[in-house]
Image: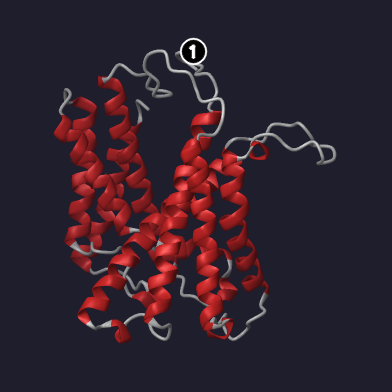
Amino acid sequence: MTWTPQAAVGWALAYGSVRVWWAIHGAPSFGQLKFDLIFFAGWSAAGLCAAAALVAVALRTAPWRWFLLVAAWAICTALLVACPLLLLDVVNGLLPGLGAPFHTVAFMSRAACLIEAILVGASAEAYRRRWRSACLFCGRAGERVRMDQTPRWALWAAYAAIAGCLIRLGAQVAIGFGMVRHSGRTLAIEGLLFEAGFLLAGTVLPLALVQSWGRVVPRWVPLLAGRRIPRWLPLGPGFVIGGLMTVYFGITLVKVATDTLSGAWHQSLAPFPLAFFWVAVPAYLVWGLGLGVAAFSYYRVTRPTCRVCSRQ
């Protein structure tokens, strides 16, 4: 964790230089959507990178100030809010047959923004750990013993994620699957892969994060029975999918509410009816939050003894 502030500064300067160039000479085409980041463009995007660099320098050199930690997390949040469309980029890049727009430059810009958010967040966490005398490597302080079993709140989070997935499917059943168009091919291979991944992320993944078979291969599995599952195999998708879904659909819910109150709905997210989004978007948001909470629990339950401070 000691290198994260320097990495955050370097990345912010590199990405910020690109944003300054675009602000002066004009940004490239970002494809059908015509933008890369949400809420930030031109000089405001360059200013966000400058703020990230400044707060990272302060986190590395300044003494403890609670408002500095708050400012760092605020900038981290702003960076995350700017790039939630990366979730769609990943899906559309892996499954181009879905027919959704994908633009390489926009994808790279959003990915760079997400990396900066992660680095600023890691720098903030290192700052907090350093000044509370915690281990910089694992974050533990004092005699803390890891949890032996999944807590009840994590189970409820996993069940909430599954419920969100099923409610989303129910909303699709209500309006009919004929409204979903995959480049004119309703049974395209990419569409089937998307649906399979959709169901796995909404049912198997939440359960794997809170059940014992998500940590150790069950006995009935031939050849692999009893083997420990690499912890980042379910943990990585849990954090990434849960985090991106939470940010993306949190912003989408705000847009749905704004368009509903302003009466501008017919101009934005048609042809789907407004009622569909009032069911599907909150369901997606609950799904993402549930995944994130379940992944946090899995992280706490499975983390090994720290090889630096030897705390459990």
Give residue 275's position: percent from left, percent from top. 39, 78
Give residue 80's position: percent from left, percent from top. 32, 52
Image quarter of the N terminus: top left
**Relative to 104, is 154 above or below?**
above
Please tell me how crowded label 1 is: few (under 14), some (14-19), or many (20+) other residues with Cα within 10 Å: few
Which residue is labeled 1 in the image?
Answer: 310
**Relative to 112, is 28 above or below?**
below
Residue 295 in view, yes or no: no
Q: Which amino acid does label 1 sit on?
A: Ser
Residue 89 in view, yes or no: yes
Q: Which residue lies furthest to the right in this view?
A: 222
Give residue 110's position: percent from left, percent from top. 37, 58
**Regarding mark 1 in the picture, which secondary structure is present there?**
loop
Give residue 40's position: percent from left, percent from top. 23, 62
Q: Which of 190 and 228 is in front in this view?
A: 228
* Point 37% across, 17% down: residue: 141
* Point 50% across, 68% down: residue: 168
* Left or right of residue 80: residue 174: right
Q: Which of 47 and 193 is in front in this view?
A: 193
Q: Which of 140 and 45 is in front in this view?
A: 140
Which colour scheme appears in the figure? secondary structure
* Left or right of residue 82: residue 188: right
Quadrant hosting residue 122: top left
**Relative to 122, is 93 above or below?**
below
